[in-house]
Structures are given as C-alpha cells and as structure tokens.
Image (tube, helix red, strand yellow):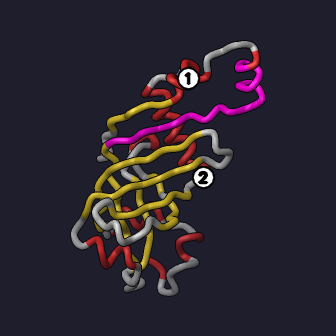
Amino acid sequence: MPNEAALEARFWRAIADDMTVMLGLADRAERRAQPMTAQLGGREGRGPIWFFTSTEADLVRDLGPGAPALLHFAAKGHELFASIEGRLVPDDDPATIDRLWNRFVAAWFEEGRDDPKLKLLRFDPESAQIWLNENSLFAGVKMLLGADPKKDYADKVAEVEMDGR
C-alpha cells in the first residue's frame, strides 16, 4: 500500500533511471510538449529538474523569463506515470552547467560549455499526480479471485505537493 511519500520516492528513482520526459509550457496550448532529457541535480534526488537545450528551440523562445510548465513522465516499463505542474525558467548558472555537463550533452554543443546556443532550463516542480501501474498477471489473478479493482487502485494514485527548490 504505497502512500504519497512512497509514490513520490518511486517517481524520483524512476526519473533518475529513465530521464526522458515530455515538457511543455502550460499557458501555450498552441505548442505541444516535446521530449527532453531530464538532469537531476537537486538535493537527495529531488527537484529542481534541469534541461540542456538550444537558444534556437521554440520552447526557449516562448519561455521568456519563466512560465508555468507541465512535465509528463512514463517509466521504462510503464509501471509508473506522472504529470507534474511547475515553473520553467532559464538558469545559465556556470557552476550548475559544469556540475551537470556530460558527454551526452557535449555531443549537442560543438563549442562545449561556451557554445553561444547553449541554454540551461530549470524546472521547479510544484505539484504532481503520480500513478503506479501494476496491471500484471498478478493483478489479473486478484480480479479473478474477486478482488475489487477500484479498491486496489485507490492506493496507487497520489496527489503530491513538491518542493522543487
């Protein structure tokens, strides 16, 4: 029976393992969310969540000094899903860039950390809905034995307030 804290902890472990998310601005319905690679650099595997991108990206052009944003995540095995509301802001702190820089990021920027197109974005998560998906053979057997799927599902969804900063 996971509780909110347990589901949140599972989310942070899952996003550290599979860093691909869909990220978009909440107030820009005309723009779709786009796949981004999340970098965790916060305290104890928690927010904020960082993204390296280009100054030429639509997301950066639309962002301005910062805006409400939505982050959607599906774990590799689809055992966990999350939809997170927060604030996305440009944050080109050189120390953070140095700390998060790696060979995968470097492959995108010909001039390295000093590339004029390099833009670091910080997502400060505020609230989330996290779903644990345990639809498996075990869940099917429980249903065959008369378990109420709605009752079992109730412990697998959490509304979580996050302290992203």
Nearer to us of marks 2 and 1 is 1
Is 78 included in the stretch rendered in magenta?
no
Kind of residue indicated by mark 1: Lys
Q: What's the magenta region?
A: 127-143
- Determine if residue 95 is in view: no
Please tell me whether mark 1 sits on a helix, a strand or a loop: helix
Please tell me whether mark 2 sits on a helix, a strand or a loop: loop
Front residue of 136 and 20: 136
In the rendered image of this protein, does residue 24 appear above or below residue 49? below
Q: Which residue is mark 2?
A: 18
Disc 2 residue crowd, few under 14, some 14–19, many 20+, Cα 10 Å = some
Disc 1 residue crowd, few under 14, some 14–19, many 20+, Cα 10 Å = few
Q: What residue sits 43% from the left and 61% below the top?
A: 23
Where residue 99 appears, as percent x and y from the top left, is 44, 61
Kind of residue indicated by mark 2: Asp
For marks 2 and 1, the one nearer the N-term is 2
Q: Which residue is mark 1?
A: 150
